[in-house]
Image (cartoon, rainbow, N blue to C red):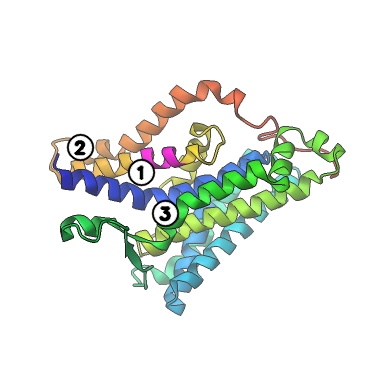
């Protein structure tokens, strides 16, 4: 494997991993508040289709990003209404949200299949401008890529260094105790879901507007479920999620390299490499999840707060 191939895999991993990391960060916030969002795939699809549609109509990708974030937050509010206000089972509510998202995104995106849009401007990574073009061209990234690691740090700061983050974690650990301390568990969960949904929408926007620059039905290809798995891998910690996103996206980039290199292996088998790696990671790391998972995760809060 040549240096150019290695750098190509790294560049591709950064591009494809950005949307996944934003989504995972959003799910970390959701689950820290005690809500499991199995409807994340539907949230991503609706956000991606909405943002792409607005970008196509307006010609402004940044407006499309804002719409994607708003769509993600509103989709999570539907989950909040079912799981928090109506006290429905979180897993069933998430699956219902996912199927709703499949249908709604198909409806929104139907008229925009094959449309061309203005993508985000790409900037050369500092320090690589003097490299030969075949190398420097691999490291021209858009604004959302440059912001993703600072966003992970910001989420960590919000969760572990602010009163709001303390409230989110308190509700996720013991909602009754949080209520006794003067917090409204339902309100905190709604806030966490909206913020988490906006981050998922940001990830979807990067996927559709900056990375793929097109809309096709089901384009998220299971990224919502992978994000849920990466939350477990990261042990519900936003900074560890960076590693998880790079590992998965690196596996995707590696299997694409193998296919383009003409390796005599079925492409369908190669397509399973990233998901197989995810399963292996979960098997290796999942044993200690009880020590890291919020105690109220997946449980319905029966109080009136």
- Which image quadrant for residue 216? bottom left
| Residue 108 seen from this side | no
Which residue bears the numbered disc 2?
A: 266
Tell me which residue sits at (48%, 40%) in the image: 241
Nearest the viewer among 22 and 260 is: 22
Callout 2 touching callout 3 (CB < 8 Å) = no
User: Can you tell which mark lies on residue 151?
Assistant: none
Secondary structure state at the residue bearing disc 3:
loop
List the single residue furthest toward the top: 287
- The image quadrant of residue 29 is top right
Could you tell me residue 158's position as x and y percent? 63, 47
- The front one of 94 and 23 is 23
User: 298 left or right of 248?
Assistant: right
Taking the spot 47% from the left edge, 63% from the top edge, the residue there is 49
For the record, the magenta segment spans 242-247
Crowd around label 2: few <14 · some 14–19 · many ≥20 (10 Å):
few
- The residue labelled by disc 1 is 249
Q: Is residue 83 left or right of residue 98?
A: right
Res. 5 visible in picture: yes
Instruction: Give the crowd class for mark 3: few <14, some 14-19, many >=20 residues within 10 Å.
Output: some
Decide which of tag 1 and tag 3 comes sooner along the chain. Answer: 3
Rounded to the nearest angstrom, the CA distance separating label 2 from label 3 is 23 Å
Image x and y of residue 1, in percent: 14, 39
Hey, which quadrant is residue 93 in on the image? top right
Query: Magenta stretch mostly in which secondary structure?
Result: helix
* Mark whose residue sits in front, 1 or 2: 1
The local secondary structure at tag 1 comes to helix
Please name whichever residue, 175 or 217, is drawn nearer the observer in this view of the structure: 175
Q: For label 1, count other residues whose C-alpha is less than 10 Å away and answer few (under 14), some (14-19) or many (20+).
A: many
Residue corresponding to mark 3: 218
- Is 40 on the left or on the right of 91, as rendered? left
Residues under labels 1 and 3: Cα distance? 18 Å
């Amino acid at each position: 494997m040549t240096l150019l191939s290695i750098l190509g895999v790294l560049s591709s991993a950064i591009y494809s991993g950005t949307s996944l990391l934003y989504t995972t960060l959003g799910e970390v916030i959701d689950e820290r508040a005690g809500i499991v969002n199995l409807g994340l795939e539907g949230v991503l699809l609706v956000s991606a289709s909405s943002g792409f549609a607005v970008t196509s109509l307006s010609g402004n990708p940044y407006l499309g990003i804002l719409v994607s974030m708003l769509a993600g937050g509103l989709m999570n509010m539907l989950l909040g209404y079912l799981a928090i206000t109506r006290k429905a089972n979180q897993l069933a509510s998430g699956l219902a949200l996912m199927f709703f998202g499949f249908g709604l995104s198909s409806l929104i995106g139907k008229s925009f299949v094959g449309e061309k849009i203005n993508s985000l401007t790409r900037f050369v990574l500092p320090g690589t401008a003097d490299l030969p073009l075949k190398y420097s061209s691999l490291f021209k990234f858009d604004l959302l890529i440059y912001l993703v690691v600072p966003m992970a740090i910001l989420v960590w700061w919000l969760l572990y260094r602010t009163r709001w983050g303390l409230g989110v974690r308190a509700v996720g650990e013991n909602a009754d105790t949080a209520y006794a301390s003067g917090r409204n568990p339902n309100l905190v969960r709604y806030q966490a879901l909206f913020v988490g949904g906006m981050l998922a929408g940001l990830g979807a926007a990067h996927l559709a507007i900056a990375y793929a620059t097109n809309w096709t039905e089901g384009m998220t290809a299971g990224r919502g479920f992978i994000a849920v798995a990466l939350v477990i891998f990261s042990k519900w910690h936003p900074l560890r999620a960076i590693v998880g996103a790079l590992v998965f996206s690196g596996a995707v980039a590696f299997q694409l390299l193998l296919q383009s290199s003409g390796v005599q292996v079925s492409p369908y088998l190669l397509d399973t490499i990233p998901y197989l790696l995810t399963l292996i990671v979960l098997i290796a790391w999942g044993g200690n999840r009880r020590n890291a998972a919020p105690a109220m995760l997946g449980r319905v809060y029966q109080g009136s707060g």
